[in-house]
Amino acid sequence: MCGHYAPTKPDACDEEGAVPVHNKTTANFCDWFRPDPGAFDGRAQQAENEARRKLSALFGADAESSAKASGTGEKDSLLDAAESLFKK
């Protein structure tokens, strides 16, 4: 990652004159690029994963994941739920 990388900035760069990179899958060039070996912080990634896990648990995404893992897809479970509404 670049030493000027700033994910909170609109163009993800803290250099004022940097040209935004729109297509990040192709080669691009930046005059201000400076490799930063300490840019990746594994603790931040762990914190993000933990927050996502808590969100999933809060909103019941774990139930969806387990249904998908057990072979019943989301489409099937939604269809079953809709059919159960109209059963007499």
Image (cartoon, grey):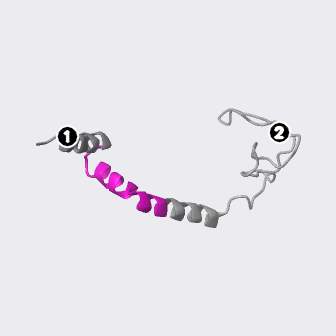
Q: Secondary structure at mark 1?
A: helix
Residue type, numbered disc 2 = Cys
Residue in the picture at 72% in, 51% down = 7
State whether the magenta stretch is mostly helix, strand or loop: helix
Q: Of residues 8 and 32, which is closer to you in this image? A: 8
Q: Position of residue 34 (x, y in %)?
A: 83, 50
Pinpoint residue 16: horizontal percent, then vertical percent.
88, 44
Label 2: which residue?
Answer: 30
Residue ID at (24%, 45%): 81
In the image: residue 49, left or right of residue 39: left
- Of 75 and 42, nearer the camera is 75
Instruction: Say whether residue 18 is magenta.
Output: no
* 49 relative position to 4: left or right: left
In which quadrant of the rendered image does the C terminus lie? Answer: top left
Residue corresponding to mark 1: 83
User: Which residue: 57% across, 61% down?
Assistant: 48
Residue 69 on the magenta segment: yes
Viewer-side residue, 61 vs 87? 87
| Residue drawn at x 65%, y 35% as measured from the top left | 25
Task: Give the mark nearer the N terminus: 1 vs 2.
Answer: 2
Task: Answer with the quarter of the image where residue 63 lies.
Answer: bottom left
* Picture quadrant where residue 60 is located: bottom left
* Nearer mark to the viewer, of 1 and 2: 1
Would you say 1 lies left or right of 80 here? right
> Which quarter of the picture shows residue 80?
top left
Report crowding for label 2: few under 14, some 14 to 19, many 20 or more residues within 10 A (C-alpha). few
Q: Which residues are magenta?
A: 53-73
Q: Tell me the crowding category of disc 1: few under 14, some 14 to 19, or many 20 or more residues within 10 angstroms, Cα based.
A: few
